[in-house]
Image (spheres, grey):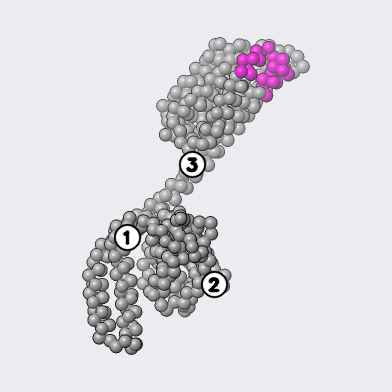
C-alpha cells in the first residue's frame, strides 16, 4: 500500500490542468483562430474534468491506496496529455515537455519499477503525439508569427512546470517533516513504555515476595490490637498501622494480578469512585491538608479504568512531596465533569516548576527529590496516553506548580 498523498496532489493539479486547457483552447481556437479541431480538444477537456470529479472526492477519503490505482491516475493524465498535444501541434506544441511532469511526480513518490513504467508511458505518449499529431500551422498577423507563439508558449510552459514542481516538492518536504516528527514522537513513546514495562515486570515479581512478610505483619498487628485497651493512644496508632498494612496488601495483590484484570474498565458512579480514591489517598498521607473543589454530578456512571486512580494518586503524591519540601502541608485538587471528560488539576505549594523534570523520556525514572523513585511523572504521562487524554504542567498563580489533566470517559447507561 502507498500513501494517498500523490493522489491528493494529482487531483489538485488536475483541476489546474482543466482550467489551463480551457484557457488554452479558447485562446488558440477562438481568439487567435488557429486551425485546430475544437471538438476533439473540448472532448479531452471534458473527459479529464469528469474523471477528476470522480477521483478528487475519492482521493480525499483515502488514507492509503494501491499502486494499481495510482498507476491508473497517472495513466489517465498521460493519455489526456497525449490526446491534447496530438490535436494541437504534436512535437511542435511548446507544452510537449509537460510529459516530464508525471515522471517527476512519480520519481519522488513511487517505487523504481513503477517509475520505469511511468517513464515508458510518457515516452510512448510523446512519440504518439509526435507521429500522429497535427503539425502546428504557420501564422502571420497582428499577434506575430508561429515562432513568436512558440516562444511565448515555451515561456509559459517553463513557468507552469516550475510552479508545479516547486509546489509538489514543498508539499513532499512538509510531509517528510511531519513523518520525521511522528517517528521521533513514537521513538520517545516506545522508550518510555519499554522502561515502564520493565518496571511492571519487576514489580509483579516483587509483589509475590512482599505478600508473605505483609501477611506476617498483619498477624502481629492483630495480636497487638487484641492486647491493647480500646481508646488508648497506642490502640489508635495500631488501628492506623493496621489500615495502612491492609492498604499495602491490597496494592500488592493488584500488582500480582494479570494486567487485563485490573485494566478492564468497570461501570461505576463517577463521584463515588473518586471519593473512595481520595479517601484512600488521605489515609496514606494523613499529614497533608487537601483542599478540594468539585463540580461532579451525582448520577453519572462511567467506564472506570484503574489507571485513573493511579494517575490521580501519583499527581497527589508528587504535589504533597513538593509542598512538604517547601515547608507546606497544603495541596489543592479541583475536579469537574464536562462533555464526557473528567477534567482536573492538582496544585502544590512548592518552589515552582522544574522544567527539566518534564523532558520525558530523557529523564525517565530520574528525580530531584531525596528518596524519590522518579516514577510519578513518567507513569502519569503513560496513563494519560493510554486513556487518550491530555496532561499539562504550568506555574500556579501565587507560587507552586499546577498539573492539569483531561480524560475522556465512556458513559454507562
Q: Secondary structure at mark 2?
A: loop
Q: Nearer the viewer, residue 272 or 57?
A: 272
Indicate which label's residue lies in the foreground, 3 or 2: 2
Numbered label attached to residue 348 = none
Q: Secondary structure at mark 1?
A: helix
Q: Nearer the viewer, residue 113 or 69?
A: 69
Number of callouts: 3
Q: CA distance from mark 2 to mark 1?
A: 33 Å
Q: Are marks 3 and 2 in contact (CB under 8 Å)?
A: no
Residue located beneath label 3 in the image: 176
Q: Does residue 223 show up?
A: yes
Q: Is residue 27 magenta?
A: yes
For disc 1, the neighbor class at 10 Å (few under 14, some 14 to 19, many from 20) is few
Q: CA distance from mark 3 to mark 2?
A: 42 Å
Q: Residue at x 44, y 31 (%)?
A: 66
Numbered label attached to residue 199 = 1
Q: Residue at x 67, y 20 (%)?
A: 25
Q: Is residue 250 magenta?
A: no
Residue located beneath label 2 in the image: 399
**Which stretch is magenta?**
23-43
Expressed as whole percent of the image width and height from the top left, the position of residue 390 reads: 48, 57
Q: Secondary structure at mark 3?
A: helix
Expressed as whole percent of the image width and height from the top left, the position of residue 140 reads: 73, 13
Q: Main secondary structure of the magenta part?
A: helix
Between discs 2 and 1, the one toward the N terminus? 1
Expressed as whole percent of the image width and height from the top left, the position of residue 245 reads: 30, 74
The quadrant of the rendering that contains the N terminus is top left
Q: Are marks 1 and 3 in contact (CB under 8 Å)?
A: no
Q: Does residue 368 show up?
A: no
Q: Looking at the picture, does residue 27 appear above or below residue 64?
A: above
Expressed as whole percent of the image width and height from the top left, the position of residue 81 reads: 57, 21
Amino acid at each position: 500500500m502507498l500513501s494517498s498523498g500523490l493522489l491528493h496532489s494529482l487531483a489538485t493539479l488536475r483541476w489546474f490542468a482543466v482550467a489551463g486547457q480551457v484557457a488554452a483552447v479558447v485562446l488558440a481556437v477562438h481568439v487567435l483562430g488557429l486551425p485546430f479541431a475544437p471538438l476533439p480538444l473540448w472532448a479531452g477537456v471534458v473527459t479529464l474534468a469528469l474523471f477528476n470529479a470522480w477521483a478528487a472526492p475519492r482521493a480525499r477519503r483515502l488514507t492509503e491506496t494501491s499502486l494499481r490505482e495510482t498507476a491508473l491516475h497517472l495513466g489517465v493524465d498521460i493519455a489526456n496529455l497525449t490526446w491534447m498535444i496530438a490535436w494541437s501541434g504534436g512535437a511542435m506544441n511548446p507544452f510537449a515537455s509537460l510529459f516530464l511532469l508525471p515522471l517527476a511526480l512519480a520519481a519522488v513518490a513511487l517505487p523504481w519499477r513503477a517509475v520505469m513504467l511511468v517513464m515508458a508511458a510518457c515516452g510512448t505518449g510523446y512519440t504518439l503525439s509526435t507521429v500522429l499529431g497535427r503539425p502546428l500551422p504557420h501564422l502571420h498577423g497582428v499577434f506575430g508569427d508561429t515562432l513568436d507563439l512558440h516562444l511565448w508558449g515555451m515561456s509559459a510552459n517553463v513557468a507552469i512546470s516550475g510552479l508545479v514542481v516547486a509546489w509538489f516538492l514543498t508539499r513532499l518536504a512538509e510531509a517528510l517533516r511531519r513523518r520525521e516528527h511522528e517517528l521521533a514522537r513514537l521513538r520517545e513513546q516506545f522508550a518510555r513504555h519499554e522502561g515502564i514495562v520493565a518496571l511492571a515486570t519487576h514489580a509483579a515479581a516483587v509483589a509475590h515476595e512482599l505478600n508473605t512478610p505483609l501477611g506476617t505483619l498483619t498477624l502481629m498487628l492483630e495480636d497487638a490490637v487484641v492486647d491493647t485497651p480500646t481508646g488508648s493512644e497506642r490502640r489508635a496508632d495500631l488501628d492506623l498501622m493496621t489500615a495502612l498494612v491492609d492498604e499495602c496488601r491490597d496494592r500488592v495483590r493488584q500488582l500480582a494480578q494479570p494486567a487485563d484484570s485490573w485494566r478492564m474498565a468497570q461501570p461505576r458512579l463517577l463521584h463515588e469512585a473518586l471519593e473512595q480514591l481520595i479517601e484512600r489517598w488521605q489515609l496514606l498521607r494523613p499529614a497533608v491538608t487537601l483542599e478540594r473543589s468539585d463540580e461532579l454530578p451525582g448520577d453519572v456512571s462511567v467506564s472506570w479504568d484503574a489507571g485513573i486512580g493511579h494517575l490521580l494518586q501519583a499527581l497527589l503524591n508528587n504535589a504533597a512531596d513538593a509542598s512538604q519540601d517547601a515547608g507546606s502541608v497544603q495541596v489543592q485538587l479541583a475536579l469537574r465533569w464536562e462533555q464526557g471528560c473528567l477534567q482536573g488539576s492538582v496544585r502544590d505549594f512548592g518552589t515552582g516548576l522544574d522544567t527539566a523534570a518534564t523532558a520525558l523520556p530523557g529523564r525517565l525514572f530520574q528525580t530531584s527529590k531525596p528518596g524519590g523513585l522518579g516514577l510519578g511523572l513518567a507513569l502519569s504521562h503513560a496513563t494519560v496516553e493510554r486513556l487518550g487524554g491530555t496532561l499539562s504542567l504550568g506555574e500556579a498563580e501565587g507560587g507552586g506548580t499546577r498539573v492539569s489533566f483531561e480524560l475522556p470517559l465512556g458513559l454507562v447507561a
